[in-house]
Image (cartoon, rainbow, N blue to C red):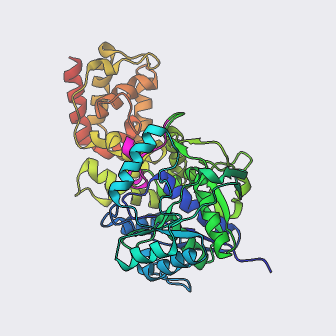
Amino acid sequence: MAKEVRTRFAPSPTGYMHIGNLRTALYEYLIARSNGGKFILRIEDTDRERYVEGATDIIFKTLEQTGISYDEGPGVGGDYGPYIQSERMGMYKQYAEQLVEMGKAYYCFCTKERLESIKGDVATQGDSLAYDRHCRDLSPEEVKANLDAGLPYVIRQKMPLDGTTTFTDAVYGDITVENKTLEDQILLKADGMPTYNFANVIDDHLMAITHVVRGNEYLSSTPKYNLLYEAFGWEIPTYVHCAPVMKDQHSKLSKRNGDASFGDLLDKGFLAEAVVNYIALLGWSPGGEQEIYTLKELEENFNIEGLSKSPSIFDPEKLRWMNSEYIRALSPEKFAEVAAPWIKKALGEDVSEEMICKMSTLVQGRTEVLSDIPEKIGFFKELSSYDKELYRHKKMKTDPENSSEFLKITREFIENYNGEWVSSELYQGLCDLAASNELKNGQILWPLRTALSGLPASPGGATELAEILGKEETLKRIDIGLEILA
């Protein structure tokens, strides 16, 4: 019987959810779902210096917004809890001390001052190791004396000094490192808290994690993990190291550089489903031409073999395109729901439901990102000043001079219009007006559209705008246009 696949997302609550973090969570989730396994959420909150109040809630909210549901974790429970690392504190010290007894780790009593002086020596000598293993060979008597004296200590991993360590990664294949390049890393800090690397190994083993997904910056740390697994005689998980997400050819995507987090993208009007779809394809290729995938389809199609060794470039324009595809696929009702806050931003909080429906119908096919909406429809609330050159259109054969005459004809027609005030009826009437004056349709419709919107481009044609504005406002704006053209 095949072993159950168990993956985990283990974020630290240090702030926003950046794109790389979300991609890791997504890939862990997809590996579990595509193999009929379990996806676990574990909060690694032991680094209190970097802890940000409220960041854990951001993690929960982000997973909920993206549809990435976990089978075990905070609030859900499971057989391997607690799932918040700070609630697991009692267990790490015993494992660190067990390694000491096995000769795989040792007590280090070096003071902060001494370690600082070593850093200076390393900078001068160009040595790659940050610690000189000063306490590695203390005698049992010296160690006991120091412990009895109550000297502060950390526990360090005792790395082999020669030979090599080889591990297999699902993306990069076999990787071998020289053991002499591995630092005797700290496992247990002076305050009794485990380091990230140590707690990771202990928790992953105790939670029966089978696959570990992380960025390829951790490739160099992996031999340290494996030596710990081997020391305890534990089974080593499958490693899946992912190439970074880049801003461009030279720079990683980074919030510190002003790049958007997941929350920022939602605030900018991107749909969560589109962001998830796009992020899934940043480093993973499903094969074939299909680019639009629902989360369910990703679960059905994902495979580790499709992951790339090469970095991926985050392309905002490609994301905009993908988001527009998702917007167009929404039902009119659903689009009106997600567009409503942006419509209210443009037209005021007291805008009617009827107007929201009209606006959403007008802009759905013309919107890439929801934040585009206020700029597209703001003229309905207030007509901005504009230049008469807007009336010049080569294709429509209009200019400021003849547009004035065309608008006068149109104004008279509208003032005397008694038909139903709907776009289709108005359009037919204006086309008949153009024909009766031996004009092209555009020579009537373009000046009217310009007068009603005051923009070089609008989310609807002249009669669509007129229907929404109403007869009185339409006449008022035509008069403003005539004044500008005078």
156 in relation to 467, above or below: below
Quarter of the image holding residue 335?
Answer: bottom left
For this view, does 166 lie left or right of residue 61? right
Q: Quadrant of the C terminus?
A: top left
Residue 252 is inside the magenta segment: yes
Of 177 and 404, the residue lying toward us: 177
Of 251 and 355, the residue lying toward us: 251
182 in relation to 205, above or below: above
Q: Quadrant of the N terminus?
A: bottom right
Specify the farthest residue to the bottom.
Answer: 79
Q: Locate residue 26, reporting x and y percent.
A: 57, 61
Q: How many marks?
A: 0
Give the residue at x 36% y 51%: 116
Residue 462 is inside the magenta segment: no
Q: Locate residue 367, reporting x and y percent.
A: 45, 44
Give the residue at x 47% y 50%: 130
409 in relation to 307, above or below: above
442 in relation to 44, above or below: above
Q: Locate residue 51, reporting x and y percent.
A: 34, 64
Asked if residue 115 shows in the view, the reply is yes
Specify the farthest residue to the right.
Answer: 1
Asked if residue 297 shows in the view, the reply is no
Give the residue at x 68% y 75%: 233
Q: Locate residue 310, reporting x and y percent.
A: 64, 42
Give the residue at x 38% y 41%: 257
Of 9 and 201, the residue lying toward us: 201
Quarter of the image holding residue 49?
Answer: bottom left
The magenta stretch is 251-269
For this view, does 82 lie left or right of residue 289? left
